[in-house]
Image (spheres, rainbow, N blue to C red):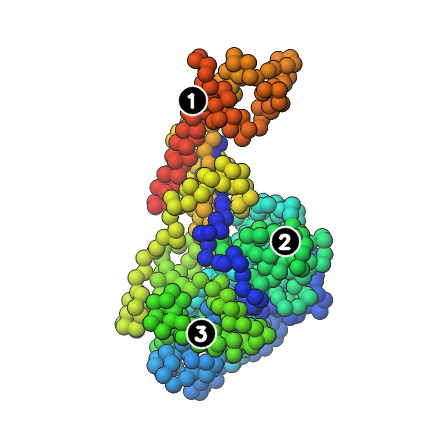
């Protein structure tokens, strides 16, 4: 059989293994539960959470209210605006905008303000806004237009106790999850990747995401029946000690707690976006276009400073972090390192990312695909009764409004990293027995004896799954491991060992026991006898050579793995 393994490779991931002091990802919590948790309960619809209210007209005026949340990509909005109000000379000011940025961590209140006309904008993730879709789409004036993608998350994690090693191990387990928060969509992606459903797990809902005793992280710490919990980076580090470490029980960590899945690898799950009301979009098309262009300009500036391409990079970066600390407060961001960590966990997508997200045909992590996933989740889990999606922006990314102000307008895909670059690392992990410790998910395909060809006609379903997982888990590696029957190698090992006298056999046929130089040898211990063959323990017998037989089996395994790889690449290109 051939095995497909989705593997974490820490040094290939941009998220830091040693995390900065605590910061807050975003408080998108729905503060409607009276108790701290609701065990195994079904959440009420989003409409019930928001409550009654009339659709209002967006108030006319010179200043437009725009919400922000506590997340790294929103530092770009601050950069564009020059602060909470548009500062003269700022990027947004140069685009003719006059904005007032307002806190939006209470997503329920955001939706109420949006509906009432206090702000024409909504700030959240695709899945969060999908949960609110029925409220947004119930009136043609408030039906949303997906305007701008800000980032992908690299700082959200599913932390599990020691017995859980892969995603498939979640079946039958109890998971702590914030009610209606950004991790609802993340869990949905994780379950679907392992072909599990929500019925396969038990959910303990919490009120808050972070910063209180009523969070998933605290439940994992306090309640032994909780098998896994979602957490943002600082809370994850408090449970495990770090992205690639396991909690020892010391210094507040939970013994055996480790990161099972992270958006550091599942990098195409949480997409942060801005949505604007349809009535406002229709009457203020030029203004909202300038908002998008201004944000993308600021994103280029921030990226240049992060990468040191700006001649005043250090001063500019420090000014940006100080501004974030002032806006969010020192309780949320005690130090500039916290602000830097907040920014680092947001993968800014810029102009190329927006073109791919909104316009690229067949993009498995594009707007159409993510919206379908969000609406499937909203309707299947009872957040909405009907499918009421968003409109894509329809912006012309080739227009002078974009081309005249942006430096990086290439829209082609660039490689995240080349798989060939990590081949040696994968093989070393496999040979050392550590590959399983890095495995997120694995599955197998079966084939006939002597088979070396794997066509899409026969294996299309498996190939599609690999392509989808490789896209969603953008910072993980798909390791394809081929297999061959070891029987001939074992037969040659036994013959050679008995002939040389180094191997002894006792017992009756069908129930033999073997010893090598007086030490028991279990022929089921593949790694052990493979090492003995490679060390030359069975060399020197002319008629049988287990070393050659083993190498032939390894060559066949590699040929099968390479054949599968080439077939998958061809399938993906088609």
Q: How busy is the neighbourhood of tag 3: few (under 14 within 10 Å), some, or many (20 plus)? A: some
What residue is shown with label 3? Answer: 318
Q: Which mark is residue 271?
A: none
Name the residue that disc number 2 marks.
247
Going from N to C along the chain, the mark reached first, 3 or 2, is 2
Most foreground residue, 115 or 194:
194
Give the residue furthest to the bottom.
61
First in sequence, mark 1 or 3: give its number: 3
| Rendered location of residue 470, percent (x, y) | 44, 48
Image point (45%, 23%), residue name: 547
The CA span between labels 1 and 3 is 61 Å
Q: Mark 2 falls on what kind of element?
A: loop
Dot 1 and dot 3 residues touching (CB under 8 Å): no
Residue drawn where x is 45% and y is 16% of the image: 540
Q: Which residue is mark 1?
A: 548
Q: Position of residue 535 (x, y in %)?
A: 48, 26
Identify the residue at horizontal 36%, vertical 74% (top origin): 312
């Amino acid at each position: 059989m051939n095995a497909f393994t989705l593997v974490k490779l820490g040094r290939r991931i941009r998220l830091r293994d040693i995390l900065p002091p605590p910061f807050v990802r975003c408080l998108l919590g729905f503060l409607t539960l009276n108790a701290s948790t609701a065990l195994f309960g079904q959440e009420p619809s989003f409409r019930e959470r928001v409550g009654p209210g009339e659709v209002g007209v967006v108030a006319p005026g010179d200043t437009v209210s725009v919400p922000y949340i506590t997340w790294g990509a929103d530092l770009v909005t601050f950069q564009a605006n020059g602060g909470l109000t548009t500062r003269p000379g700022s990027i947004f000011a140069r685009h003719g905008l006059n904005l007032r940025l307002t806190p939006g961590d209470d997503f329920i209140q955001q939706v109420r303000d949006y509906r009432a006309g206090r702000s024409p904008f909504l700030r959240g993730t695709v899945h969060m806004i999908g949960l609110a879709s029925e409220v947004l789409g119930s009136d043609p004036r408030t039906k949303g237009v997906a305007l701008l993608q800000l980032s992908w998350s690299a700082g959200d994690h599913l932390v599990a106790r020691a017995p859980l090693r892969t995603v498939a191990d979640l079946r039958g387990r109890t998971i702590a999850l914030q009610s209606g928060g950004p991790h609802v969509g993340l869990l949905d992606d994780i379950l679907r990747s392992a072909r599990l459903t929500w019925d396969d797990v038990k959910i303990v809902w919490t009120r808050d995401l972070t910063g209180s005793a009523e969070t998933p992280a605290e439940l994992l710490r306090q309640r032994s029946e909780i098998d896994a919990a979602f957490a943002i980076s600082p809370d994850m580090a408090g449970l495990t000690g770090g992205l690639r470490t396991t909690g020892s029980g010391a210094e507040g960590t939970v013994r055996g707690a480790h990161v099972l899945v992270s958006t550091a690898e599942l990098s195409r799950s949480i997409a942060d976006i801005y949505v604007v009301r349809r009535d406002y979009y229709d009457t203020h098309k030029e203004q909202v276009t300038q908002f998008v262009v201004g944000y993308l300009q600021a994103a280029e500036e921030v990226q240049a400073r992060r990468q040191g391409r700006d001649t005043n990079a250090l001063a500019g970066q420090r000014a940006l972090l100080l501004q974030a600390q002032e806006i969010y407060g020192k309780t949320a961001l005690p130090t500039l390192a916290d602000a830097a960590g907040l920014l680092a966990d947001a993968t800014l997508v810029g102009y190329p990312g927006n073109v791919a997200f909104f316009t690229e045909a067949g993009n498995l992590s594009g707007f159409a695909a993510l919206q379908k996933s969000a609406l499937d989740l909203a309707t299947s889990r009872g957040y909405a009764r009907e499918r009421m999606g968003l409109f894509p922006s329809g912006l012309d990314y080739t227009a002078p409004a974009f081309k005249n102000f942006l430096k990086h307008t290439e829209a082609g895909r660039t490689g995240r990293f080349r798989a060939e670059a990590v081949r040696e690392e994968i093989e070393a992990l496999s040979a050392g027995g550590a590959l399983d410790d890095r495995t997120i998910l694995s599955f197998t395909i079966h084939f006939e004896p002597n088979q070396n060809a794997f066509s899409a006609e026969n294996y299309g379903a498996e190939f599609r799954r690999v392509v989808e997982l490789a896209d969603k888990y953008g910072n993980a590696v798909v390791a394809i491991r081929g297999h061959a029957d070891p029987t001939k190698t074992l037969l040659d090992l036994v013959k050679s060992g008995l002939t040389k006298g180094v191997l002894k056999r006792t017992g009756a046929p069908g129930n033999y026991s073997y010893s090598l130089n007086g030490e028991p040898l279990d022929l089921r211990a593949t790694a052990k006898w493979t090492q003995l063959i490679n060390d030359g323990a069975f060399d020197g017998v002319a008629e049988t050579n287990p070393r050659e037989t083993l190498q032939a089996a390894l060559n066949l395994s590699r040929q099968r793995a390479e054949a599968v790889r080439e077939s998958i690449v061809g399938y993906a290109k088609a």
